[in-house]
Amino acid sequence: MTTELRRSRAVFSTEDFSLIKEAVAEHVKRVADDPRSVKFAHLYHRLGRIAS
C-alpha cells in the first residue's frame, strides 16, 4: 500500500458554476423580501468571481 497523496478531483465544472449562478439569481428574485436574501446575493457575487 502506498502512502502517496492523491489529488482530489473537482466536484463542479466551470460550466456548473455558471448554471448555479443563474439558479441563485432566480432564487434571489423570489426571496427578495426574506432577510436571507442578502446571504443569497453574497453567494451570487462569489459565484460570479469563480465563473467569470
Image (cartoon, helix red, strand yellow):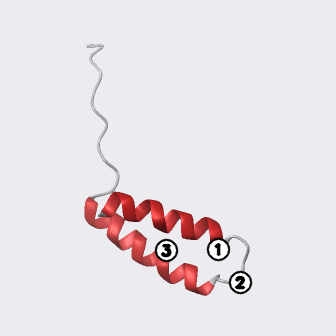
The residue shown at (41%, 70%) is 20
> With 23 as the anchor, is 11 left or right in this view?
left
- Residue under label 2: 33
Q: Earlier in the sequence, mark 1 or mark 3?
A: 3
Is the Cβ of the residue at disc 1 closer than 8 Å to that at disc 2?
yes
Amino acid residing under circle 3: Val
Q: Earlier in the sequence, mark 2 or mark 3?
A: 3
Residue nearest the viewer, comparing 26 with 12: 26
Mark 2: few, some, or many residues within 10 Å (few <14, many ≥20)?
few
Amino acid residing under circle 2: Asp
- Residue under label 3: 24
Amino acid residing under circle 1: Ser
Mark 3: few, some, or many residues within 10 Å (few <14, many ≥20)?
some
Residue nearest the viewer, comparing 38 with 17: 38
Q: Considering the image in quadrants, where does the C terminus appear?
A: bottom left
Mark 1: few, some, or many residues within 10 Å (few <14, many ≥20)?
some
Q: Is residue 1 above or below residue 18?
A: above
The residue shown at (42%, 62%) is 47
Q: Nearer the viewer, mark 2 or mark 3?
A: 2
Q: Nearer the viewer, mark 1 or mark 3?
A: 1
Q: Secondary structure at mark 1?
A: helix
Marks 1 and 2, how far apart in space? 7 Å
**Residue 11: percent from left, percent from top:** 35, 51
- Residue under label 1: 37
Q: Secondary structure at mark 3?
A: helix
**Residue 26: percent from left, percent from top:** 49, 83
